[in-house]
């Protein structure tokens, strides 16, 4: 449907490539002046803007390029436009898609391309004390050379009026969490506005990929966001496997799904406990963290790592499970499930907790759609989006995944989506263990051809993770674009907090629980 929409409005102006894999993901190049026309066609087709990024393609003898990835249901479409070196500008998509607001600020900060018509070009990820002409994602940038520090000041959004005051929170927090700065404008306890300032854990990950081999790249992907190590490893590996047109063994697919669902359960259980703790119900935190610890210890015994890190590789996996391991997981899940249901019954019948979580931090369905939200946040706000359903890899294509969707969009809805997903993940794991086929764990991956691209989308526990990789003239990594769910869902937190009281911010923030590291690439 999306390809037809592009063809109807652009006709022969859209030139499709056969170097994008899998070929089910269409990719076309359009003239720079028609880039917004393509976005308009996508908007009329009700497509989401899934990602927007830039590449330096000077090693191919060209200039720069800007890509926009759109999604509707199971269909993805990538629209590319070329940007010359002597005029590094492109038309902004912000008037069509709100997520472009941050995507394009990041493109401007790290690649130095100017989105014409963008309403706010303050630096994003790149800090104001970096030299203005330092663009780390350009090929001319020397990542080994220290950058001089310059004087700079970030211009925060201001609110004025009688009784209006500001509350700065962070970037260093009281808890052991990653740094991020939140600036509130409030009247009394009522929040008028929240502005986020992220980037404090920017590590140059996308730049670092360019110096790694395809096999070593998966280790970096596993560390993009440590609590989502399995999902990021799978997404990177699937993108590489797509561009090399590799078919991995069936058993490896099943093991990847097993790891993915265990990661989902552990994080959801921990989140529910932490949300309850922010409402001063510490009992739930202690009990749910006890259950999470059971899962993590089983991971360590069976797979050698509490978070199953570095077990997914391009071509498959590097660790197996035997019959005793299957029995141990089944026994463990029965114990976890029994205690979890008791605890959720307590959660559901606690009136003081209900008073804190219901009608708090509401992200309405229409706003979630406008922000192109994904994952837990989207499903709690009425959007039925889940890559396990729309873009399944085996074994998800062998059975129905029951996706919980609520419409209230409040803290409770985001908790309850987690509750239902834990129940569903337990069912999925039992299916996997009963039906996992015999066979090899991995297959060899060939070196990609030059100037080839691979794409993948994987439903991590926070939501849809997207990887897009491009090989250079020598077949090495020219670009690895990572779009964590947090890249779009952080915008939702800013919108959900309006009209709430200041003490409810921790509840709202934890119910979103977005990754700083996954965002601050």
Image: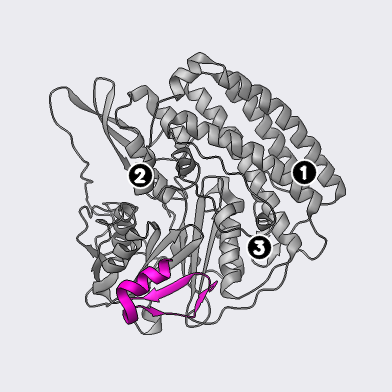
Reading the image, the residue beneath label 1 is 301
Front position among marks 1 and 2: 2
Q: Residue furthest right?
A: 324
Magenta range is 1-30
Query: SS for tag 1?
Result: helix
Chain-order first, disc 2 or disc 3: 3
The percent coordinates of residue 447 (x first, y second) are: 60, 78
**Residues packed near mark 3 inside 10 Å, few (<14), some (14 to 19) or many (20 plus):** many
Reading the image, the residue beneath label 3 is 313
Rendered-image quadrant of the N terminus: bottom left
| 368 to the left or right of 446 | left
Rendered-image quadrant of the C terminus: bottom left
Please tell me which residue is depicted at 70% across the width and 60% down the height of the picture. Answer: 253
Query: Is 5 covered by the magenta stretch?
Result: yes
**Residues packed near mark 1 inside 10 Å, few (<14), some (14 to 19) or many (20 plus):** few
| 31 to the left or right of 224 | left
Find residue 100 and report its image quarter. Answer: bottom left
Question: Is residue 183 in view?
Answer: yes
Residue 461, above or below 443? above
The percent coordinates of residue 317 (x first, y second) are: 71, 60
Chain-order first, disc 1 or disc 2: 1
**Residues packed near mark 2 inside 10 Å, few (<14), some (14 to 19) or many (20 plus):** many
* Front-lying residue, 373 or 225: 373
Please tell me which residue is depicted at 34% across the width and 42% down the height of the picture. Answer: 367
Chain-order first, disc 1 or disc 3: 1
Question: Is residue 175 in view?
Answer: no
Q: Residue furthest left?
A: 161
The percent coordinates of residue 112 (x first, y second) are: 28, 65
Reading the image, the residue beneath label 2 is 491
Query: Is 281 covered by the magenta stretch?
Result: no
């Amino acid at each position: 449907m999306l390809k037809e929409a592009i063809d109807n409005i652009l006709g022969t102006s859209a030139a499709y490539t056969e170097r994008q894999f899998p070929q089910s993901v269409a990719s076309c190049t359009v003239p720079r002046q028609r880039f917004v026309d393509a976005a308009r066609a996508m908007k009329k087709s009700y497509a989401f803007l899934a990602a927007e990024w830039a590449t330096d393609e000077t090693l191919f003898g060209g200039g720069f390029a800007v890509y926009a990835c759109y999604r509707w249901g199971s269909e993805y479409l990538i629209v590319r436009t070329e940007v010359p070196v002597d005029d590094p500008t492109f038309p902004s998509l912000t008037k069509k898609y709100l997520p472009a607001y941050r995507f394009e600020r990041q493109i401007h900060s790290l690649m130095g391309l100017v989105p014409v018509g963008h309403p706010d070009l303050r630096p994003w990820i790149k800090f104001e004390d970096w030299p203005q002409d330092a663009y780390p994602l350009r090929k001319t940038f020397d990542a080994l050379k220290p950058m001089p520090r310059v004087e700079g000041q970030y211009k925060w959004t201001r609110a004025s009026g009688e009784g209006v005051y500001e509350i700065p929170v962070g970037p260093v927090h009281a808890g052991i969490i990653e740094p991020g700065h939140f600036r509130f404008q409030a009247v009394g306890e009522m929040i008028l506005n929240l502005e986020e300032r992220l980037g404090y854990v920017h590590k140059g990950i996308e730049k670092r990929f360019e110096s790694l081999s395809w096999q070593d790249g998966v280790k970096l992907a596993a560390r993009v966001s440590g609590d989502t190590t399995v999902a990021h490893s799978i997404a990177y590996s699937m993108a590489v496997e797509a561009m090399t047109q590799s078919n991995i063994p069936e058993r490896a697919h099943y093991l990847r799904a097993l790891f993915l669902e265990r990661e989902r359960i552990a994080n959801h259980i921990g989140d529910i406990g932490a949300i309850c703790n922010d409402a001063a119900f510490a009992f739930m935190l202690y009990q749910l963290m006890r259950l999470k610890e059971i899962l993590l210890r089983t991971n360590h015994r069976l797979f050698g790592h509490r978070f199953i890190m570095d077990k997914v590789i391009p071509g498959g996996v590097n660790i197996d499970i035997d019959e005793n391991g299957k029995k141990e997981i089944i026994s463990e899940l029965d114990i976890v499930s029994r205690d979890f249901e008791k605890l959720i019954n307590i959660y559901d019948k606690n009136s003081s907790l209900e008073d804190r979580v219901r009608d708090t931090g509401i992200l309405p369905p229409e706003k979630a759609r406008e922000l192109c939200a994904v994952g837990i946040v989207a499903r709690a706000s009425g959007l039925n989006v889940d890559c396990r359903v729309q873009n399944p890899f085996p074994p998800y294509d062998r059975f129905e995944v029951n996706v919980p969707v609520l419409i209230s969009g409040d803290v409770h809805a985001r908790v309850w989506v987690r509750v239902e997903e834990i129940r569903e993940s337990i069912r999925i794991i039992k299916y996997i263990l009963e039906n996992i086929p015999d066979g090899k764990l991995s297959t060899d991956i060939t070196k990609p051809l030059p100037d080839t691209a691979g794409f993948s989308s994987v439903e991590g526990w926070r939501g849809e993770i997207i990887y897009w990789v491009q090989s250079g003239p020598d077949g090495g990594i020219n670009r690895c674009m990572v779009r964590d769910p947090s890249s779009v869902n952080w915008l939702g937190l800013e919108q959900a907090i309006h009209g709430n009281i200041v003490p409810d911010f921790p509840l709202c923030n934890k119910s979103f629980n977005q990754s700083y590291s996954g965002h601050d690439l």
